[in-house]
Amino acid sequence: MKSLIAIILLSSFCIHDSSFAAEPPPNIILMMGDDHGWEETGYNGHPHVKTPVLDEMAATCFRFENFYAAHPSCSPTRASFMTGRHPNRMGTFNPGFSIRPEEITIAKILAKAGYHCGHFGKWHLGPVKASSPTSPGAMGFHEWVSHDNFFELNPSLSRNGGPPEVIQGEGSAVVIDEAIKFIDRASKNGKPFFTVVWFGSPHEPYSGLPEDLALYDDLPAKYKDKKVKLTSNETGGPTTRPQGEVLRERYAEITAMDRAIGTLRKHLAASGLRDNTLLFYCGDNGTSQDASLVLPHRGVKGQVYEGGVLVPGLIEWPSRIPQPRSTKARATTSDLLPTLCALTSQPLPDRPIDGTDLLPVIDGKMSERPKPLWVWQFDAAHIDKTEPYIDPQLQQGTTPLAKKAAGKATRDFNNFRHTTITNADYLGPRAIIDGRYKLVIHEQKKGAPKQELFDLAQDPAEKTNLLEQQPDIAKKLHSKLHDWQQSVLHSLTGADYRK
């Protein structure tokens, strides 16, 4: 009898003593801008663009001073974001190349961990229709309101893979509104949520609300002489316009996106969710050529120099990051999956992972990246396209956009089987960053590839090539880069899926 009473008392104590209660898992929101480069924020000193919400986050939360997209263009970076792997491992070489169905995404992992997973906005890893084997649903998301590619005002989006529907409003506000509804549903059901919001802004062609455009009315006169190429909203084809007009519209989109992020932050606070929610923001590649003002870094979108891959990187998470901090440690979109696996105590997928766990950086226990960071634009022009990886009909997009391709207002996707590796597969602009040094390699029309070695600690603008002064460092980096490429190409053959 005494032992029974003791058990009852102990059980009562365990129930009522909060020290025995497990901490609730954090909610997770990962946001990404489309073509939003590092310098296009107020907090990084841009001379024109207004981003008061991101500026406040940078001043009060955790700021990566050196955050990288894994690739200088969109689809490949998104593949790295979802899988923790370099996009060349899965044949996502360029924009319009899909992910492969066998890839293990963050959403698949967190769904198994009990999270309710939703995607909102740009997908660009395959069609978003329900029948696609690479749709958000096929890749682990329970709900999605998404577009095959990018979108502007009054976007046409697919809800859970259904036919496209036009949702009236500014594009960033629309996807944030859908994300908030999803968050509220998950919270009401007592589920932790994993929410991915990939904005369509500020990718061209540009459009903005009158009140946002008015903030930049001075720019057309300031940049009237330079002409830039982009897409016409009216025809969907190429056009040439004065850069000042283009910047006015682009910055209006960035400001609207910034405001939408503010709407989400306010909702989290009002709902009592802010403290235990990890809110992350980055860009998917550097600033596009039409909008570049050639500020602190060399290069633009599509190039492996810093200006092509450096993007904003911010984390707001009051319960774990109560005071503002920043780090110079280099981080990349490939780091998201291993970081979230560590955070939620989930094992890493049993295959090569290129990212690293950032929790020690976030907690102030690590100040330097423990492994190299790689960027590689695969030379896809030479690949054998005779055997599609996925039935081409399943790769046809449905959601229209302003920019036409071959006369179509929708986008189709590609991926190809690549079972035999040749020397040509190692080509394409590529770079490795290890510690303070960065090696960049480009093929040339004649002669040996061009190599450039930069000390990013002393020369973040990549102006001084140290190859002749530091040949041993360059040789060591070249060897590491080549060894890593071998691993990537082994994955490209599909070997990782045969384990």
Image: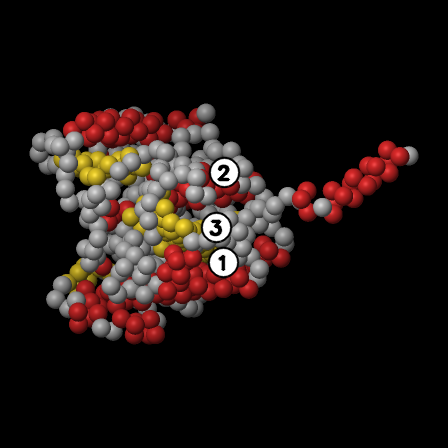
Q: Are marks 1 and 3 in contact (CB under 8 Å)?
A: no
Helix, strand or loop status at disc 3: loop
Helix, strand or loop status at disc 1: helix
Mark 2–mark 3 Cα distance, whole angstroms, equals 17 Å
Give the side of residue 167 with respect to residue 3, left or right. Answer: left
- Which callout, 2 or 3, points at the residue further toward the start of the chain? 3
Quadrant occupied by the N terminus: top right
Expressed as whole percent of the image width and height from the top left, the position of residue 301 reads 25, 50
Q: Name which quarter of the figure residue 420 lies in.
A: top left
Helix, strand or loop status at disc 2: helix
- Which callout, 1 or 3, points at the residue further toward the start of the chain? 1
Which amino acid type is shown beneath numbered disc 2? Ala
Expressed as whole percent of the image width and height from the top left, the position of residue 433 reads 27, 37
Q: Can you identify the residue that label 2 sits on? A: 342
Please name the residue shown 13% across and 32% down the image.
Answer: 469
Q: Name which quarter of the figure residue 477 lies in.
A: top left
Please name the residue shown 20% across and 47% down the image.
Answer: 461
Which amino acid type is shown beneath numbered disc 1? Ala
Expressed as whole percent of the image width and height from the top left, the position of residue 363 reads 46, 43
Give the side of residue 114 with respect to residue 120, left or right. Answer: right
Residue sitting nearer the eye, 407 or 159: 159
Mark 2–mark 1 Cα distance, whole angstroms, equals 25 Å
Question: What label does residue 160 carry, if any?
Answer: none
Q: Can you identify the residue that label 1 sits on? A: 179
On the question of residue 203 being in view, the answer is no
Q: Are marks 2 and 3 in contact (CB under 8 Å)?
A: no
Q: How many numbered marks are there?
A: 3
Q: Can you identify the residue that label 3 sits on? A: 321
* Classed neighbour count for the residue bearing mark 1: other residues with Cα under 10 Å, few (<14), some (14–19), many (≥20): many
